[in-house]
Amino acid sequence: MKDPIGKAYLIKGGFVMDPANDREGKADILIADGLVAGVENEIDEAALRGEYKNAEKLSGQKISLEVIDATGLYVTPGFVDVHSHFRDPGFTEKEDIYSGAKAAAAGGYTSVILMANTKPAIDNEEQFKLVQKRCDAQDIHVYQAAAVTLNRAGEKLVDMEALVKAGVKGFTDDGSPIMDEQLVISAMKEASVLKVPLSFHEEDGAYIGVAGVNEGEASGRLGIKGADREAEIVMVKRDLELALKYDCKIDIQHVSAKESVELIRKAKKKDKKGLIHAEATPNHFSLTEAAVEKYGTNAKINPPLRTEEDRQAIVEGLADGTIDMIATDHAPHTKKEKAADEFGKAPSGILGLETALSLSVKNLIQPGKLSVSEFVKRISLSPSELYSLEAGRIDIGRPADITIFSTDEETTYKKFNSKSENSPFLGEKLPGKVKYTIAGGVIVYKA
């Protein structure tokens, strides 16, 4: 990340939403040398400039102060995504760590966790360190997760202890469900000792014909057998029960079915240790299976978009905290891949980082399902807590990771910062606009 020494920002007049500190109201924030240096109801700009002039005389070092007018805008901890694919290494024609980080910054994200389904998979210390070094060079905080099993084949565990010592913050075979229950138990026992989370892609292939479309009305009209909801339900049920039994912190990824929401709700009532976590993507709380007929393969994702009843259940799960995180599952693919002549041949995945705010405003905040403060908990605080990141809050002395946005202004998505364009929302005008993203005390995106 860029060196912020000697650079200061004064964010004036914004409405600060910081749920971790129960702060909700108009305030000014001072950022200096990459850290939060002050949070007050009002900071006198003239007096501050006077202090800096005196400091310059004493130190001989120039101090640059930039004032950001945040009047009428929300100022919150930077967004944190626990589920992104930057396709690097192996598929950099779709995305790479640099372009992915730019897309994240444009979406208001200051921290991102990358999935391990690269080529080669991130399943050993050497490969992890190679990729994490590139992650560390970006303008935002990018963290590479490791696979649970070697080559994500679901047959043998990686050396989890060695990977944690190397810096890995969590494990996932995302994209590939782990079918061997005994292997899952072994992974949970190890993760519990190491105090790191496991994230699970919950789809049993025995219930899937063509992946990426719900087995229902849409698949029927397309003339194909889709992915039955039971594929998700049986896996969610198994992993919730095992997590509670073996004291393992888990994340149920990209929840798509109403039955899964209810299973998670019941499990959380039994959970006295904060083990059970779940995420919903903006795609799953914004769209239904009808989108596949409208947008074709650009609405093909795993698990698939389901019914309006499922969508509403996900929204309610976010509202009551059953689903405690909004995660994008940012999944870039090339135009050529998505234009496959058969639906089943096209890869599953939708871009997510740059549209997450707008879809949340439209489908959660404007309908009154989530307050802005609750939205910040789901998109910043809870994700940061899952991975024990130094993020999700605005504390004096902590890194200044801050997102400034409007829920009133609109964004027209004419193009993306991502290398790819596989999104149903390309060309759409949606409510919500990221105005500034500040990571490590540096402006990394400005509208």
Image: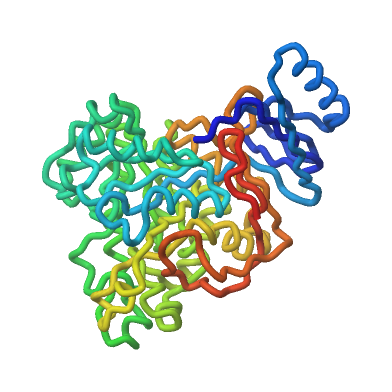
Picture quarter containing residue 273?
Answer: top left
At 49% from the left and 48% from the top, the residue drawn is: 325
Q: How is the image coloured?
A: rainbow
Q: Nearer the viewer, residue 8 or 13?
A: 8
Residue 155 in the image: x percent, y percent?
A: 11, 45
Residue 266 in the image: x percent, y percent?
A: 42, 48
Question: Is 102 drawn above or below residue 193 in the view shown?
Answer: below
Question: Is 174 drawn above or below residue 140 in the view shown?
Answer: below
Residue 361 in the image: x percent, y percent?
A: 63, 60
Residue 38 in the image: x percent, y percent?
A: 73, 26
Picture quarter containing residue 366?
Answer: bottom right
115 on left or right of 421: left
At 25% from the left and 76% from the top, the residue drawn is: 344
In the picture as drawn, the residue positioned furthest to the front comes out as 60
Image quarter (top left, top right, bottom left or bottom right) of the C terminus: bottom right
At 69% from the left and 25% from the top, the residue drawn is: 37
